[in-house]
Image: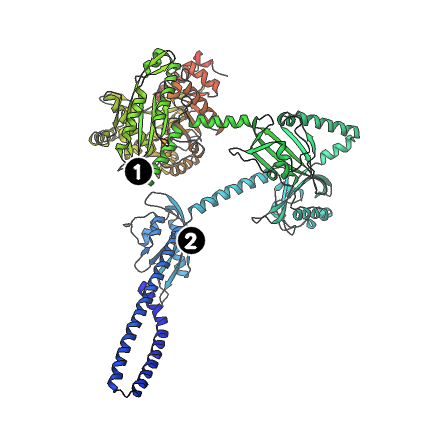
């Protein structure tokens, strides 16, 4: 391609150079001949001169030719580099499809967009296989149509990337080339990744639909007009006032064409005033003719509509029918005294309001109203004439997190005098005595009947306590309440960030899992308070010996994790590990006691040869710590992947479990879930057991870990769901209305066809009631592929299946996942419930989980309830749903109906009924 372009360039320009050179050569040669003739030199001398001259001229022309070629090549290379860079920035790949060979070639960028490797089949079927299955038939029909009709290729379509399974949206464009017979030869074009654009369009559509729902549902009448005062739209309430059946019947009309044509001039004058001044006209009263010829009174507000350039392009109006109020006023015939009493009442109410309210005259800034709450909060006598010059002296205001005071012209009271409404929810105010508070401030301009701003109204609320509560919730969510170290959630965030940073910098990081040796005897001998003080002391020591930038977190109990950053190699972490062991092992004076413990540390590094996530790193470090304890404590142990598991043993275990599934050796036991406050059994959790012919009944902890990551994990999971649905149907036919929850592993959940296969199973049980099947997942199941997890769980909920987040609070996810994941139920882990009456940390976690569930409108249930006292405390905290050994152990399905009848007669638990 470069040679062709160069040849074309030289072809276009060489004739100019050749003509110029020949003319110059002829001129010089003629001059030489004349000169030699005058000197009477022989002709051969002229020939020699001419030959030398032509050689020199030829060398010069060849030099010029090569120089032109180099310049053209440099220009072409720069152009191609610019084109590649533009395609990379625009996420745009190019392609050429040979329709005779049914193969295509493309740029490297297109490989990244499609998520394909070099060995991917680049034929027509290969391209068609990229299209998401449900769109392939339509795409093939579209392609055949545009070929037959000789149309360009221009289509947005959805693909599934083979490399990572991600679903992406792309926009393909291309032009066909045909031969003389009209046979298509080639399609050349580009493909652009528009996934982000599609997501933004979907979000915008959702926002518009929500706004339209609000507008259509409000009883207020809402309308909007263009700059020519023609109606652009309205809500149903407005259309009804206009005598129309649907808002669309109003669009395009003006006020002269409406039933209130008599008031059209008045309405349009108000509209123009708002658009010209750019200032809203609020809460003024006017009359309007109704479709039946009557008259109603309106309280109307109008604001200008502005475009993205802040130009006024229309007017938005809102009004309410105040006819009843006006009639009441007329009937009562309010006297001046009555109005005065009403004003006094309003003044009293204003003074009694708990929020601060003050109003100043515009433009002078003279105070008109300052209620009791404002004077008490701001200080009496601090409100002189609050003009623009001395407002900054009236109160010192700052933005949260900044030492710079608010500019005077940006204060809500000043903005109000300029006709601008303002809402600030993070203003920090300093009183004359030096104390500070955080305020939520709302400033509103007040406009008279002539549209003139006559006052600025400001009301504010002290939200210091709320902000402190939010900060405390943030601290509870991310920090350990005892040691103030980062907790599991914050550790997970920092570890994921550190892993990305290590990959980017090409350095290592270390995860050190630290467990105190023989700490339990200290708690048992000296009490939990002494033990807590010991933990605080050791946490402070360990934090001091780490570097700035490293993270030390407490997981709970006597377990800590350190994340060591920016390591050149594994040896660089050894001095820090020794310092940690020394810091822990030194004696500590706690009260009157001199106490001493040691620590065992498990260590692992990242990155590794195999791809690994944060949760796996934690498990590796945990396993290494266990090996350190087994080796004698007070030492560290490096995780060895070769010793992590025996491949042969695991393979044998998986094969034995396949045989067990085939021979129907697995059974389900059911643990009841009860509403203790309501005194009813509402469901049961299905728990798998292995009825081993030699070893007896085995619990899941003895076999499930062997099949993680294998296809047997999915097969066994589907067997559990199928068996639970069968049992659910049997109970329903027997008149026992319960729901059943089943545990779903991460590997099973993230199968691309999980929701599809679940839907096929549900079709076999058409009488199953909506929401009677609950899928229980753990937090780590979603973290490995959040996008896939959200899509799968959303599809399951559309099938009528509810989602429960199991073992909540024990994983390494953040609050972002709780807000994002489509879950219905939060299950408090039994590790927190077990010690809740004696461990303040566990109690605080339970309180936080219940509050989070209430905040996010989720159902909360506690597992592992073993005593009536635990049940009483959970009910008092707002958690009435629970399960555990204190209520019932898991049992065969046939035993559950008799147990339910017996439990409802148990006096102890029935005392918790409300």
Q: Is residue 260 left or right of residue 528?
A: right
| As drawn, 414 above or below 665 | below
Whether residue 729 is visible, yes or no, is: no
Query: In the picture, residue 36 is in which quadrant?
Result: bottom left
Whether residue 741 is visible, yes or no, is: yes
| As drawn, 258 above or below 676 | below
Residue 575, given in percent of the width and then of the height, sits at 28, 28
| As drawn, 87 above or below 348 | below
Task: Pick out the residue farthest to the front.
Answer: 39
The numbered mark, 1 or 2, whose residue comes first in the sequence reads 2
Q: Is residue 692 left or right of residue 724?
A: left
Q: Is residue 794 left or right of residue 326?
A: left
Residue at figure coordinates x 32%, y 21% from the top left: 584
Q: Nearer the viewer, residue 830 or 133?
A: 830
Task: Say few, some or many: other residues with alpha carbon within 10 Å of mark 2 (under 14 / 14 to 19 / 20 or more).
Answer: some
Residue 128, given in percent of the width and then of the height, sits at 35, 51
Residue 414, given in percent of the width and then of the height, sits at 64, 38
Task: Pick out the residue farthest to the left.
Answer: 648
Q: CA distance from mark 1 to mark 2?
A: 44 Å
Residue to which mark 1 is pinned: 507
| As drawn, 448 above or below 670 | below
Q: Is residue 304 left or right of residue 489?
A: right
Residue at figure coordinates x 47%, y 19% from the top left: 877
Q: Which is closer to the viewer, label 1 or label 2?
A: 1
CB contact under 8 Å: marks 1 and 2: no
Mark number for residue 155?
Answer: 2
- What colour scheme was applied to this rendering of the protein? rainbow
Residue 517, given in percent of the width and then of the height, sits at 29, 19
Quadrant housing the N terminus: bottom left
Mark number for residue 587?
Answer: none
- Dot 2: element: strand
């Amino acid at each position: 391609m470069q040679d062709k372009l160069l040849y074309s360039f030289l072809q276009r320009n060489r004739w100019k150079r050749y003509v110029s050179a020949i003319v110059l050569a002829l001129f010089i040669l003629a001059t030489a001949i004349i000169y030699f003739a005058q000197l009477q030199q022989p002709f051969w001398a002229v020939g020699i001169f001419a030959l030398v001259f032509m050689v020199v001229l030829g060398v010069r022309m060849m030099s010029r030719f090569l120089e032109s070629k180099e310049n053209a090549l440099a220009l072409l290379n720069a152009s191609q580099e610019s084109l590649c860079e533009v395609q990379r920035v625009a996420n745009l790949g190019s392609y050429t499809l040979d329709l005779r060979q049914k193969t295509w070639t493309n740029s490297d960028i297109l490989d990244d967009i499609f998520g394909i490797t070099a060995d991917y089949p680049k034929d027509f079927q290969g391209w068609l296989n990229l299209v998401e299955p449900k769109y392939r038939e339509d795409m093939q029909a579209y392609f055949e149509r545009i070929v037959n009709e000789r149309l360009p290729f221009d289509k947005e379509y959805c693909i599934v990337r083979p490399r990572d399974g991600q679903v992406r949206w792309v926009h393909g464009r291309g032009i066909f080339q045909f031969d003389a017979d009209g046979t298509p030869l080639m399609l050349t074009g580009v493909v652009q990744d528009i996934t982000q654009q599609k997501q933004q369009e979907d979000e915008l559509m959702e926002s518009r639909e929500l706004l339209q729902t609000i507008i259509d549902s409000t009883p207020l009448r809402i309308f909007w007009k263009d700059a020519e005062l023609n109606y652009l739209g309205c809500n149903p309430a407005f259309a009804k006032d206009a005598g129309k059946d649907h808002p669309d019947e109003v669009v395009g009309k003006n006020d002269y064409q409406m039933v209130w044509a008599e008031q059209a001039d008045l309405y349009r004058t108000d509209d123009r005033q708002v658009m010209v001044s750019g200032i809203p006209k609020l809460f003024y009263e006017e009359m309007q003719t109704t479709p039946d010829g009557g008259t109603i009174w309106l309280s109307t507000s109008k604001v200008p509509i502005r475009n993205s350039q802040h130009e006024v392009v229309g007017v938005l109006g809102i009004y309410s029918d105040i006819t009843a109020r006006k009639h009441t006023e007329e009937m009562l015939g309010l006297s001046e005294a009555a109005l005065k009493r009403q004003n006094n009442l309003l003044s009293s109410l204003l003074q009694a309001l708990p929020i601060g309210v003050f109003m100043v005259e515009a433009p002078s800034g003279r105070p008109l109203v300052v209620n009791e709450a404002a004077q008490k909060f701001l200080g009496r006598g601090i409100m002189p004439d609050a003009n623009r010059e001395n407002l900054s002296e009236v109160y010192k205001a700052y933005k949260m997190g900044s030492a710079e005071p608010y500019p005077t012209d940006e204060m809500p009271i000043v903005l109000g005098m300029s006709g601008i409404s303002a809402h600030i929810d993070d203003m920090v105010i300093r009183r004359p005595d030096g104390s500070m508070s955080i305020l939520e401030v709302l400033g509103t301009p007040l406009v008279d009947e002539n549209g003139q701003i006559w006052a600025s109204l400001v009301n504010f609320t002290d939200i210091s306590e709320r902000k402190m509560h939010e900060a405390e919730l943030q601290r509870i969510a991310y920090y350990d309440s005892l040691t103030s170290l980062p907790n599991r959630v914050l550790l997970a965030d920092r570890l994921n960030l550190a892993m990305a940073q290590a990959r980017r910098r090409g350095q290592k990081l270390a995860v050190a899992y630290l467990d105190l040796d023989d700490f339990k005897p200290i708690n048992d001998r000296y009490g939990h308070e002494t033990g807590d003080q010991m933990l605080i002391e050791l946490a402070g020591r360990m934090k001091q010996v780490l570097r700035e930038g490293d993270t030390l977190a407490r997981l709970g109990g006597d377990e800590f994790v350190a994340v060591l950053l920016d390591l050149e190699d594994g040896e660089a972490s050894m001095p820090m590990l020794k310092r940690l062991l020394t810091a822990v092992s030194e004696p500590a004076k706690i009260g009157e006691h001199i106490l001493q413990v040691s620590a065992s540390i498990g260590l692992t590094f990242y990155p590794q040869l195999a791809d690994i996530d944060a949760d796996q790193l934690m498990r590796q470090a945990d396993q290494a710590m266990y090996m350190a304890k087994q080796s004698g404590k007070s030492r560290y142990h490096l995780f060895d992947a070769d010793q992590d598991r025996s491949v042969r043993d695991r393979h044998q275990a998986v094969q034995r479990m396949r045989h067990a599934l085939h021979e129907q050796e697995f059974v389900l036991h059911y643990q009841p879930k009860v509403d203790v406050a309501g005194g009813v059994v509402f469901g049961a959790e299905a728990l798998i057991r292995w009825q081993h012919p030699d070893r007896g009944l085995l619990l899941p902890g003895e076999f499930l870990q062997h099949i993680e990551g294998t296809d047997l994990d999915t097969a066994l999971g589907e067997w559990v769901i199928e068996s639970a649905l069968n049992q659910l149907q049997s109970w329903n036919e027997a008149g026992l209305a319960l729901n059943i929850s089943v545990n779903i592993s991460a590997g099973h959940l993230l199968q691309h066809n999980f929701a599809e296969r679940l839907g096929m199973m549900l079709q076999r049980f058409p009488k199953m009631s909506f929401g009677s099947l609950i899928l229980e997942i753990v937090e780590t199941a979603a973290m490995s592929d959040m996008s896939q997890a959200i899509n799968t769980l959303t599809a399951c909920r559309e099938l009528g299946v509810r989602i429960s987040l199991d073992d909540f609070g024990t994983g390494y996810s953040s609050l972002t996942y709780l807000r994002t994941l489509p879950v219905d139920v939060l299950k408090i882990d039994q590790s927190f419930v077990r010690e809740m009456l004696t461990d303040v940390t566990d109690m605080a976690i339970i309180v936080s989980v219940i509050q989070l569930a209430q905040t996010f409108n989720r159902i909360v249930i506690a597992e592992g309830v073993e005593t009536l006292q635990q049940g009483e405390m959970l009910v008092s905290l707002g958690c009435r749903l629970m399960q555990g050994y204190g209520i019932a152990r898991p049992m065969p399905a046939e035993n559950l109906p008799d147990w339910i009848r017996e439990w409802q007669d148990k006096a102890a638990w029935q005392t918790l009924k409300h």
